[in-house]
Image: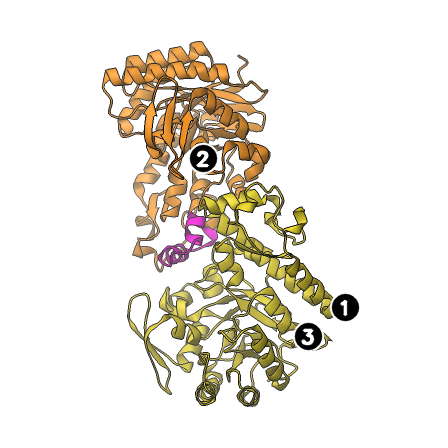
Chain colours: A orange, B yellow
């Protein structure tokens, strides 16, 4: 398979690259804001673009239930529907069937479940997942898998991973190839080294445009997550992008980039933004805290963020008064912070100074923002 | 008193003018979006400016309780606090003490009430209202009055209006004059012609930079409201702006402009926007209605609105999915529609064709949007 990924530089295990797609280039390491239901929550789409994001994520499970993939296809596809012209990655729906749907029943064929919206019965299979993502016009389609729950015994994890590998082959067979549209496989195997190795090798044999690492950030803790990455990544082809699904906090992303991961998605910057929690160069800051009530300073002068025109006192006021502008502004800030973080890592890898850059980032996060006023 | 209002043209009773202030010019007839708690709900401030609004409104009652006028003053005033450099009009607080506060007690001195936020006891007087609006740095300060409830007997309305006139004098005495900062008086008198005449004459004797008409749009109906305007406006000085408080729907505003009113404020475009109700050239449209689910058309091609890049189907989806972007986009549209409406009236007055323009507007609203697809 022709690989659309170009590697520009490495720094230790970390990589600087470009993933070329039908909807434009993705600079890696890349962070993908989550746009679950055809909207990045609390953001106008042009403001998402202004953060510097090259790609966003959509959730197949949500979109298949409402407004439905067929309706989006009739309206010209997900890009036209939500007004975003750059790449979109869609997940396979499998993860959210497990976390959101009621009355699930899993068989070799797929998963039958009841919609959390209207209770209707739905069958999701590898073939149907590929069809839905095709109808959406997804730039990057994810293979249909089971995200193995944590904790799982070796036997449970082996059984689940083997099913995901059979579903990966069926996903590959059902995927309709179009130039610039990509298909990623997903490595499973829980925290078991031998299963991760087996899964990575099996996916490589099938052959995908990129390789995701699934089943992490599900409760195993950062240290164990990074350890599993360390034993999994070496079995993945160097000429394809690697995507760590659902991760994470800035420090998680940094650690994963240092272990050779290229792509990330996470709801944290948007979800935390709606709850007054800001990611900054000084670590996390909760704007609901009363100490901000009279603070005339901008949130984080070290981050180029359009909300630096406002005082912390104003942001605090907006959350105290339950005004929508609070979530809107803090979501915008957090997405700017995440893109600024990725840009900084890309620059550091290009100049072979990621380790020093990582130390400086971690020192900033650990330092906090209290002493700055002392 | 030096009048900051310039009259450019008249068309029947309707007027085209400019109100000059310390924070810039206001083109009249003008619509002022409501920014109750130092934010126009669901809008980024630069997007408010992009609608063409020359002035916004802030609510003294909300701001005095949270974050407090003293805190806003320490942070540089309301303009700096919320990032808006154009004119701001603040109401006096009186209206919302009546509608929101608990345990009110009114005396000649003022109103004592319990905060709806923390229950603390607060005394609001004409002098304190002037002080608060001064601390906020309000461009246009409103005199402290009692908004007479509806219905009221002639005796009740007379008693209430007389109190408001004594408070208007005290407001004038307490107002700190600064160049380009204005003070408006408020006509009361319920639906009684003799009381409206008396109130208008009394305020003119005291002398204000502008004259508001209060105590309307409180349940009397559009016909009665327009009738009262017709008997009140002739008693107001021609060389000062006239402001109809809390009005209204597009047709209310049009009728009032035709009777010589220059300024308006209303929560309808923002409140309705949050509830899926759009104001358009074809009348009101409820985006929650299922008939929009597959509609690829923009909301209202006749209105220059940034949300015309989206389909009605997308807007419908956002409200069905309870996504914040729905209220954000529809608020933005409604504010664009209101400013477009005012701009159209200003152009028509300048060209002495307001009556024909009004007929065309009303025909559009009455026509609805259903036949457009037939």
- In space, the residues marked 2 and 3 are separated at their CA atoms by 53 Å
- Tell which of A52 and B233 is nearer to you: B233
Q: Residue furthest left?
A: A153
Residue B91 drawn at (x, y percent): 47, 73
Q: Main secondary structure of the magenta part?
A: helix
Mark 3 falls within which chain? B
- Location of residue B233 by image quarter: bottom right
Residue on which disc 3 sits: B14
Q: Earlier in the sequence, mark 1 or mark 3?
A: 3
Residue on which disc 1 sits: B351
- In space, the residues marked 2 and 1 are separated at their CA atoms by 53 Å
Instruction: Confirm or deny contact between disc 2 and disc 3 (CB under 8 A).
Output: no
Q: Residues within 10 Å of mark 1 (few under 14, many from 20)?
A: few
Relative to A342, residue B42 above or below: below
Residue A361 drawn at (x, y percent): 37, 35
Residue A286, which numbered label?
none
Q: Is residue A310 magenta?
A: yes
Residue depicted at x 37% and y 26%: A112
Residue depicted at x 54% and y 35%: A71
Q: Residues within 10 Å of mark 3 (few under 14, many from 20)?
A: many
Q: The residue tagged with tag 2: helix, strand or loop?
A: helix
């Amino acid at each position: 398979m022709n690989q659309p990924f170009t590697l520009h530089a490495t720094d230790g295990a970390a990589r600087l690259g470009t993933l070329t797609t039908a909807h434009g280039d993705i600079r890696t390491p890349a962070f993908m804001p989550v746009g679950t239901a055809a909207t990045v929550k609390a953001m106008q789409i042009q403001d998402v673009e202004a953060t510097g994001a090259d790609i966003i994520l959509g959730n197949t499970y949500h979109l298949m239930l409402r407004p439905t993939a067929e309706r989006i296809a009739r309206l010209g596809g997900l890009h036209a529907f939500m007004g975003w012209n750059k790449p979109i990655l869609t997940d396979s729906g499998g993860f959210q069937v497990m976390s959101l749907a009621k009355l699930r029943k899993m068989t070799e064929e797929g998963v039958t479940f009841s919609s959390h919206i209207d209770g209707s019965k739905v069958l999701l299979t590898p073939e149907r997942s590929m069809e839905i993502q095709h109808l959406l016009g997804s730039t990057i389609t994810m293979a249909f898998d089971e995200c193995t729950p944590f904790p799982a015994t070796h036997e449970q994890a082996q059984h689940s991973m083997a099913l995901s590998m059979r579903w990966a082959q069926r996903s590959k067979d059902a995927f309709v190839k179009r130039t610039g549209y990509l298909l990623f496989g997903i490595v499973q195997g829980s925290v078991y080294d031998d299963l991760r190795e087996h899964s990575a090798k099996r996916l490589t044999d099938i052959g995908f445009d990129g390789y995701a690492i699934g089943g992490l950030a599900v409760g195993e803790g950062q240290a164990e997550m990074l350890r599993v990455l360390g034993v999994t990544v070496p079995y993945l082809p160097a000429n394809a992008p690697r995507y760590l699904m659902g991760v994470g906090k800035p420090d998680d992303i940094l650690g994963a980039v240092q272990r050779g991961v290229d792509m990330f998605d996470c709801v944290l910057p948007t979800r935390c933004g709606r709850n007054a929690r800001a990611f900054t160069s000084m670590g996390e800051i909760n704007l609901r805290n009363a100490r901000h009530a009279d603070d005339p300073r901008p949130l984080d002068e070290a981050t180029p963020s359009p909300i630096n025109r406002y005082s912390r006192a104003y942001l605090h006021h907006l959350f105290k008064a339950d005004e929508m502008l609070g979530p809107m502004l803090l979501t915008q800030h957090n997405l700017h912070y995440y893109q600024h973080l990725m840009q900084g890592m890309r620059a550091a890898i290009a100049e072979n100074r990621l380790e020093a850059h990582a130390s400086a980032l971690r020192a900033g996060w650990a330092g906090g923002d209290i002493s700055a006023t002392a």
